Every structure is written in structure tokens, then in C-alpha cells.
Amino acid sequence: MVVRHASRTQRVGIVGAGIAGLAHAWSAAERGHQVTVFERSSKSSGASIRNFGMVWVIGQPDAMQAIALNSRDRWLEAAQKAGFWIAPCGSLHLAHHDDEWQVLQEYVQQHQGSLRSKYLRLLDPDQTQSMTPAANPKGLLGSLWSDTECCVDPTSAIRAIPAWLHRDYGINFQFSTAVTHVQSGSVRTADSKMHSFDQIVICCGDDFATLLPEVYQGVSIRPCKLHMMRTIQQPDSWRIGPHLAGGLTLRHYPNFNGCPTLKSLQQRIAHESPELDELGIHVMASQNHLGQVVLGDSHQYGDQVEPFDTCDIDQYILRELRKIIQLPTWDLQAHWHGIYAKYTGGLVFEQLVSPGVRVFTGLGGNGMTLSFGLAEDAWDRWEIT
Ligand SMILES: Cc1cc2nc3c(=O)[nH]c(=O)nc-3n(C[C@H](O)[C@H](O)[C@H](O)COP(=O)(O)OP(=O)(O)OC[C@H]3O[C@@H](n4cnc5c(N)ncnc54)[C@H](O)[C@@H]3O)c2cc1C
């Protein structure tokens, strides 16, 4: 257990036990603060347990590399201390079209000599297939290997972290406890109790309505709904190897934005399959410790978010996945959706709303990747202000 010096031990209240709240709880406790986390559900059930479990360093812009790598190191440390499964599996972007292969080559060329370059390697089809039995050989032109990605099983990881933080840092977790009001110096919970704190961090994910709704007015933040699926356990201890993504993903994360061929790739996909743009579909696969393969996803924003999960979206996702990967079995064990908060003004919406009260949300598809690193960065800044 690391306890760093704190200029003054403070009472810290955190609302929400998703990955953002847990990351802040850990960083605050390491600095010697006395931390309480409030979570309205009996166990975490938000975006943080509904995702791929990809620590997706490759998808981050260059400016976020150091924070993303720090976050990755902290995942490895947390897994070791809390005793949950993690695999430093790396990732492959598979190219099955000339423009995809071109973008991958441009990306590597652009990063020559940069911090990122030592983690990247272009692979030919044979090398690709030696890294994963799942790459569809039909039309495979090559792939981009990246060394930096990790895989966790989000449900077991997010539910193991509170027990560890309580045991090693004495963090007080109050589950089944909704916070109904926040002001400088205190929070009120649904049982009408008041709790006093010096610092409060609101990590409520996509709930913009309950606490301080006025803070989100006029801010470019909105919910985003994603469809996900999970296969049954793959037979015969079959392993996918690295996380897998394909050409559709090149247009999703901002890291490939500087590649000259990206534009024509985007145009081709928009022309060939307009439904993929309409539904924000790009496809990825990861495999958990149980041998199940997690598949996704789509992106529907704001008013497009409906409670119903229409089957055509799942079918499009599976159609696109089958073009780039092959699995021993595609039999599904589960399908679900998750909703995250997406802030378009930056990678996270962090705001000091009144003395000692901060909102921290809007991490979009990067919360598992960045939360640990962003919380460290935040507490380093907040300690001196
Ligand atoms: C399908 C899907 C796939 C994804 N894949 C990845 C991935 O592979 N890699 C990656 O980096 N990111 C991924 N993400 C994004 C990532 O999951 C999110 O960015 C992250 O989980 C957001 O964390 P959070 O703590 O802000 O929100 P949440 O996990 O939603 O947590 C917010 C918590 O606050 C609680 N809460 C809200 N209001 C109150 C209140 N008033 N009182 C008490 N508690 C309250 C909620 O119950 C909830 O538990 C994915 C997201 C989804 C949905």
C-alpha cells in the first residue's frame, strides 16, 4: 500500500462507484485522504461493467499517451493487489482493404521516432496469423500490432476493486446509497442523512439529471448507447490472443485522424454501407478469462437512445465481424447495451462547480483506458490548488 504525503488530510466524498469514482477514490486515499464512496446500486452496474474491458492505449491521441500508459500501469498494479484477472494482450488492427492497409502504414510512418513507435509493428498476413487464430485469412493484407493494450473482465474487476480499496486503504463504501443533494462541504443521501466532506467528486456517469443538473446546461455532453454481445466459452481452450479491431475502427478513434488515406476510407464505407455510419458501428473483439469473446459495438447518441435493443444492430455488428474474424463458435451467451456520457469538448468533463465540489464525467469510450491516469493527474493538480 502506498500512502503519499498529503499537505493536509481531507475528508473526500465520491459519488459513483464506476471506474471514474474508483480511480478518484484510489488516488485520494494514496495521498492520505479519508475517502467515502457512495453508490446508488447494490453493486456497480453502469457503463464500467458493461464494456469490452479493453485498456485501449492505441486509440488515444498522442497528447494522452503518457496518461494512458500510466493508467495501464495502474491497472496492472490494481489487478495484482486486488486479485482480479488481467492480460497484457496487445492489439491488432486487421486490414482487409487496400485503404485500410495504407492507413496503417501511414500511421506507423507518422509515428517514427515518437514515444508510441516502440510499441508498434506492421505485420504481414503470416505474421498476423501467428499472433491470432481469429484473423480471417480471406483478403487479409496485414495488420498493425500494438504492444500496449490490456484486457480485464470489467464486471469482476469493477466489483473486486472496492473490497481491495476498503481492505488496504480503509475506504468506506456505501452501496445502495443514492446521493440526492450536493453542496460545498456536504452531501445528502436518500435516507436524508448529511455527510460532511472537504472535497466532493461527482462521478455519476450519464446521470445528468439528479445532481447539479444546471452544470450540464449548454455543455457538449450527451449519452451514448452501445450494443454488445458475448459468445459462450470458446471450445478447447481456444484463445483469441490480442484484442482485435478492423478497418471500421480506423474511423472511430481519433488517433488515425492524421492519416491522409483515412478520408477516402471513410467515404468508401459511407458509400458501401451507410447504415454503419448511421448507427456508429465499428467492430472489435476481446476475450475474457472464461474464454468468452466479447463483441461490439454501435453508437447512438442523445435522442437516438431508446430503451429497446433492435436486432438489426446486432446483425450488422455480427456481419461486419465475420468479415474480419473467425471464431470456433459464434453462439451467443448474452447481449446487452451500455450507456456512457460523451463529452465532445475534450476527453473528460471536469469542472469545479463550487468550493470543494467537482464534476468528473464524459469519458466516452475511453473510461476504462484513462480513468486511473486522469485521476492521478487530477489529484496532483488539486493538491496544490
Ligand atoms: C458498451 C461499452 C463498451 C465500452 N468499452 C470500453 C473499453 O473497452 N475501453 C474503455 O476504455 N472504455 C470503454 N467504454 C467506456 C467506459 O466504460 C466508460 O467511459 C466508463 O465506464 C465511465 O465510467 P463512469 O464511472 O464515469 O460511469 P459509470 O460506470 O456509469 O458509473 C457511474 C456510477 O454512478 C452511480 N451514480 C449515479 N448517480 C448517482 C447518485 N446520485 N448517487 C449515487 N450513485 C450514483 C451509478 O449507479 C454508476 O454506478 C465502454 C462503454 C460501454 C457502454
Image: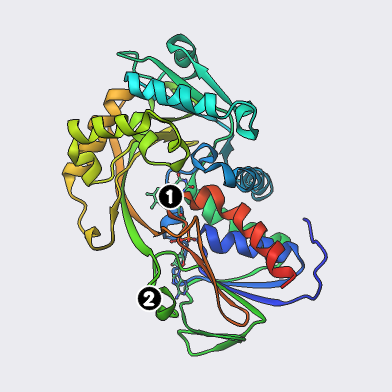
Q: Amino acid at mark 1?
A: Gly
Mark 2 or mark 1: name the one nearer the start of the chain.
Answer: 2
Residue 198 position within the rendered picture, expressed as x and y whole percent measured from the top left: 67, 81
Crowd tier of the residue under label 1, counting other residues whose Cα lies within 10 Å: few below 14, some 14–19, many 20 or above:
many
- Residue 162 visible to the viewer: no
Crowd tier of the residue under label 2, counting other residues whose Cα lies within 10 Å: few below 14, some 14–19, many 20 or above:
few
Q: Residue at x 51, y 40 (%)?
A: 56
Q: Residue at x 50, y 55 (%)?
A: 347
Depth check: give the residue in front, 127 or 328: 127
Q: Residue at x 66, y 43 (%)?
A: 73
Q: Amino acid at mark 2?
A: Gln
Q: Which residue is denoted by mark 2 in the rendering? A: 217
Q: Residue at x 17, y 45 (%)?
A: 311
Dot 1 beta carbon under 8 Å from ligand 1: yes
Residue 170 position within the rendered picture, expressed as x and y whole percent measured from the top left: 71, 67
Helix, strand or loop for disc 1: helix
Depth check: give the residue in front, 350 or 136: 350
Q: Which residue is denoted by mark 1 in the rendering? A: 365
Residue 205 sits in which quadrant? bottom left
Above or below for 217 versus 121: below
Q: Along the horizontal axis of the image, is 93 left or right of 112?
A: left
